[in-house]
């Protein structure tokens, strides 16, 4: 009889290129094999992965990060100055933008917001600083098996495999972004949601392998699998 156990842990932290984006991931893995007697053996293989992700990863049309740089951005902008002026407020309390709604000579004292709000675009850093987007992903997957070996020819194995995941997100958009934009269409809001998913397989396999008359090989395999799948989603948000 013998027992073999292997356990590993890994950690990965990534600071993203987009301001305020990062990922913190931890993985625990184990593999255990047990020989119960000359006929029976068992084993467990399990992996648990948990990951926290922060930041805005929208890369669709005219978004405030990569889409802007590739589609509408002014090539004469100094990104270092943009970074230095992150959080700068106008006299009306809105976030300063590099893209004014109107020309400087069109300022109307009776309607200051029409002048100071950003037309479509914010300061990229100010935009990211006023978003709070986070998500967590937990995943547990692996298998448990029991093996019966009658002799060197005949073997039966029963295995249960599971892949289970839990996902959660929470997004906050601050009111100052809605107040500071003109024609952006962005509204202050809050959204949250979660997902549970479970995939399970019940498997049984019997095999027979033998050689007769030195040249005649016989290999037989029979088995079955029962598959179950569950998924539940719940999402809610303001406007």
Image (cartoon, grey):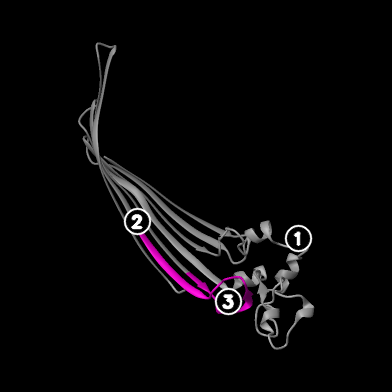
Q: Position of residue 176 (x, y in %)?
A: 59, 79
Quarter of the image for residue 110 reads bottom right
The residue shown at (41%, 59%) is 138
The answer to if 23 sits in the magenta stretch is: no
| Image quarter (top left, top right, bottom left or bottom right) of the N terminus | top left
Q: Which mark is residue 75?
A: 1
Q: Which residue is mark 2?
A: 197
Q: Which mark is residue 178?
A: 3
Q: Secondary structure at mark 1?
A: loop
Q: Describe residue 81's horizontal placement relative to residue 162 as left or right.
A: right
Asked whether residue 206 appears in the rendered view, the answer is no
Q: Describe residue 10's horizontal placement relative to residue 17 as left or right.
A: left
Magenta stretch in the rendered image: 171-197
- Tell me whether circle 1 and circle 2 mark residues in contact (CB < 8 Å): no
Q: Position of residue 36 (x, y in %)?
A: 23, 41
Determine crowd level at label 3: few under 14, some 14-19, many 20+ residues with C-alpha closer than 10 A: some
Q: Describe residue 195's horizontal placement relative to residue 82 as left or right.
A: left
Q: Which mark is residue 99?
A: none
Determine crowd level at label 1: few under 14, some 14-19, many 20+ residues with C-alpha closer than 10 A: few
Q: Foreground: 107 or 222?
A: 107
Q: Foreground: 234 or 4?
A: 234
Asked whether residue 148 appears in the rendered view, the answer is yes
Q: Secondary structure at mark 3?
A: helix
Sequence order check, earlier mark of 1 and 2: 1
Q: Describe residue 218's horizontal placement relative to residue 96 as left or right.
A: left
The answer to whether 5 is drawn above or below residue 19 in the figure is above
Mark 1 → mark 2, Cα distance in angstroms? 45 Å
The answer to if 183 sits in the magenta stretch is: yes
Q: Foreground: 92 or 139?
A: 92
């Amino acid at each position: 009889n013998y027992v073999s156990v292997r356990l590993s842990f890994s950690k990965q932290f990534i600071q993203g290129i987009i301001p305020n984006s990062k990922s913190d991931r931890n993985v625990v893995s184990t593999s255990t094999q047990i020989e119960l007697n000359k006929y029976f053996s068992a084993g467990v293989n399990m992996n648990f992965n948990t990951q926290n992700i922060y930041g805005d990863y929208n890369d669709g049309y005219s978004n405030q990060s990569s889409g802007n740089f590739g589609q509408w951005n002014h090539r004469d902008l100094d990104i270092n100055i943009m970074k230095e002026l992150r959080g700068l407020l106008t006299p009306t309390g809105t976030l300063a933008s590099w893209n004014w709604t109107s020309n400087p000579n069109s300022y109307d004292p009776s309607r200051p917001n029409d002048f100071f709000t950003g037309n479509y675009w914010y300061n990229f850093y100010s935009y990211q600083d006023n978003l709070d987007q986070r998500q967590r992903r937990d995943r547990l997957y692996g298998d448990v098996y029991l093996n019966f070996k009658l002799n060197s020819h005949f073997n039966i194995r029963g295995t249960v495999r599971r892949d289970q995941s839990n996902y959660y997100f929470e997004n906050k958009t601050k009111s100052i972004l809605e107040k500071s934009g003109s024609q952006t269409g962005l509204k202050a809001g809050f959204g949250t949601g979660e997902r549970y998913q479970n995939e399970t397989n019940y498997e049984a396999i019997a095999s027979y392998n033998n050689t007769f008359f030195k040249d005649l090989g016989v290999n037989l395999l029979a088995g079955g699998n029962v598959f179950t799948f569950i998924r539940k989603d719940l999402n809610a948000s303001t406007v």
